[in-house]
Image (cartoon, grey):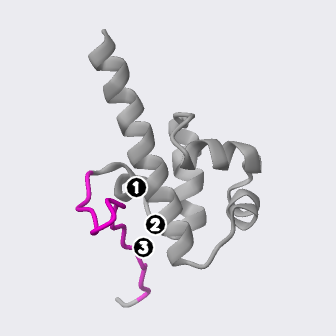
Amino acid sequence: MTQNINSITNLSVKFGKKVRKARHDLGMSQEELAAKADINISHIGQIERGLKSPKLVTVQLIAVALGTTASTLLKEHPTDEKGSAVVEPTHTSNIQ
């Protein structure tokens, strides 16, 4: 049971790091992300610190606000030298 709780906590921390990295890469403040995602700023902070596990709807709102996809934020990514997740924003194109 403890292993399951630790695994969930670890996932929350990894997800929070991905959100923070993507936000920083865009030069976006927590306030800006909260406004774009229509989420309370304190909830954004708790998610980024791994203290809260967001609902899927919240994951989607955050992803759209960051210009990426929920699947990109949720999948495992390589980490940089500081242990931070490397997340690339997705770009949509109108090229047909």
Q: Which mark is residue 22?
A: none
Image: magenta residue range: 76-94
The quadrant in which residue 55 appears is: top right
Please report contact status of discs 1 and 2: CB closer than 8 Å, yes or no.
yes
Looking at the rendered image, the quarter that the N terminus falls into is: top left
Q: Which residue is mark 1?
A: 73
Q: Which residue is mark 2?
A: 68
Q: Amino acid at mark 3?
A: Pro
Sequence-wise first label, 1 or 3: 1
Residue placed most toward the observer, 48 or 61: 48
Residue 60, position as x, y percentages in the image: 53, 50
- Please give the name of the residue rendered at 33% of the width and 65% of the height, measured from the top-left corner: 82
Circle 3 SS class:
loop
Taking the spot 36% from the left edge, 73% from the top edge, the residue there is 88
In the image, residue 81 lies in the stretch drawn in magenta: yes
Residue closest to the eye, 46 or 40:
46
Residue depth check, mark 1 versus mark 2: number of the one nearer the observer: 1
For the point 71% across and 63% down, the residue is 36
Q: Quadrant of the C terminus?
A: bottom left
Query: Secondary structure beneath disc 1?
Result: helix
**Figure check: 23 above or below 71:** below
* Secondary structure type for disc 2: loop
Q: Which residue is mark 3?
A: 89
The crowding category of the residue bearing disc 2, from other C-alpha atoms within 10 Å (few below 14, some 14 to 19, many at least 20), is some
